[in-house]
Image (tube, rainbow, N blue to C red):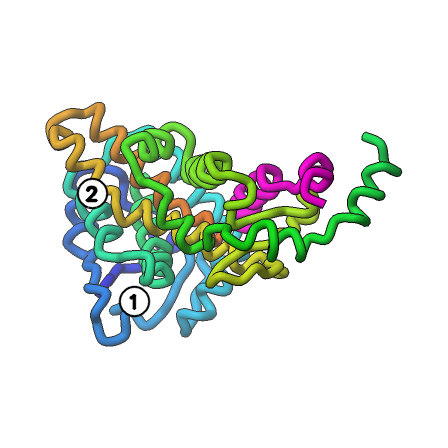
Amino acid sequence: MLHFDVIDVKKHPNNLPTCNEDNNEKLLDSTQVSDVGSSDGMLNYITRQFKCVCGMSYKHRQSLLRHNKTCYILQSQITSKTKELSNESLDKETLTTLVNTMAKFNVDNQETLVKVLKEIIPNVGVNNIVNTNSHNNISNNFNVQMFLNEKCKNAMNLTDFIETLPITSATYENTIENGLTKTITSMFVDGLNNMDILERPIHCTDPSRKTLYIKDNDVWEKDNNLNTIETSITKIATKQRTMINKWQEANNGWKTDEDLQTKLTSLVFNSMTLIEQDQKETNKIIRAISKNTHLTQEIKEEYK
C-alpha cells in the first residue's frame, strides 16, 4: 500500500525535505504502491489524521479531499513546484519508482491511478522541490440527426478511435516539450483530421457551446454533459502514463546520461499532471476538438 508521513508545515517549517539524494531515498523507503489486485484497490494510510500543507487537519480522508479541491496554497505549491521540477533531474531511483507506479495500471484502472498520482504529486512535487440570412437558411434545412444516422452510419465508434491513437516516441517528445494538454489535443485533432468527415466519431454543431455528437456502441448521441468526451480524454492520459516505460526502453542509456534523466523527469511530471481533474485544461482539449469537428456551413450545404 502507499504510506506516507504528513508534516505539519506550521509547527515544523524546517523539516520539509529538499530535492536531494538522501531525501529521495527516504521517499522510496516510505512510499510503497500496492498492486491493482489488492483487496480494496484503494490507498490506505498509517496516520489517522489527514493534514493539508496549509495547516488544516481533518479526521476523515474525504474531508481532506474536499478541502484540497479549493485549497489555494496546496494548488499553487503543486503547480509551481511541478514546473520547477520539470527543469531539474531527480535521481534515477525516484524516476524509476514513479514510472513503475504508473506502469502498474491500465486504462480500466484509471480512477485508481488518479488517486495514486494525487498522493504522489504532493509528496514528490511539493516536498522535493459571414452572411447571417443565408447561413440560417442552410441551418434550417440541415437535419443533424439525419446526417448522422444516414450519412455517417458507418462512422467509427469513439472507443475504437481512442484505441487507434498511437503512443510513439514523438508523443513523448511532445509531452516533454509542450505538456500533456497540448499532446492529447494534438493526438485527438490529428487523428480526426486524418479521417474522412463521414467516418469521424465526433461532430460539433456549435463550437462556442461545445455541442458534440458522439458515436459509440454503434449509436449517435448528443454528449449533453460532455461526460463521454471527458472519459475519453482520461483514457488517453492514462494510456500514456502507463506506457512511459516504453520511453525508457527506447532510451536505455538514461541511467548514466544526465540529459536523458532531465528529459525523463520532464516526461514523468508532465504526464502526472492531472488534467482530468482540472476543468480548465480539459476544456482546452474539448474546445480544440469542437473547433476541428465543427459542421461548418459549407459542410451542411454539401450534405443537406
Q: Which element is circle 1 on? A: loop
- Locate residue 127, reporting x and y percent: 32, 46
- Comes first in the chain, label 1 or label 2: 1
Q: Which residues are magenta?
A: 278-304
Q: Is residue 299 visible to the viewer in this orientation of the structure?
A: yes
Quarter the N terminus occupies: bottom left
Q: Depth check: 77 or 120 in front?
A: 120
Q: Residue 66: say if magenta.
A: no
Q: Depth check: 221 or 248 in front?
A: 221
Q: In the displayed structure, does residue 263 sit left or right of residue 158?
A: left
Quarter the C terminus occupies: top right
Is 128 rendered above or below residue 35? above
- Locate residue 58, reporting x and y percent: 43, 69
Is 177 rendered above or below residue 127? above
Mark seen at residue 302: none
**Structural distance between the alpha carbons of marks 1 and 2:** 23 Å
Q: Nearer the viewer, mark 1 or mark 2?
A: 2
Is 189 rendered above or below residue 146? above
Q: Which element is circle 2 on? A: helix
For badge 2, the amino acid type reads Asn
For badge 1, the amino acid type reads Leu
What residue is drawn where x is 44% and y is 38%?
191
Mark seen at residue 245: 2
Q: Residue 294: say if magenta.
A: yes
Asked if marks 1 and 2 touch (Cβ < 8 Å), the reply is no
- Locate residue 234, reporting x and y percent: 42, 53
Mark seen at residue 43: 1
What number of labels is visible?
Answer: 2
What residue is drawn where x is 25% and y is 69%?
46
Q: Is residue 280 visible to the viewer in this orientation of the structure?
A: no
Identify the main secondary structure in magenta: helix
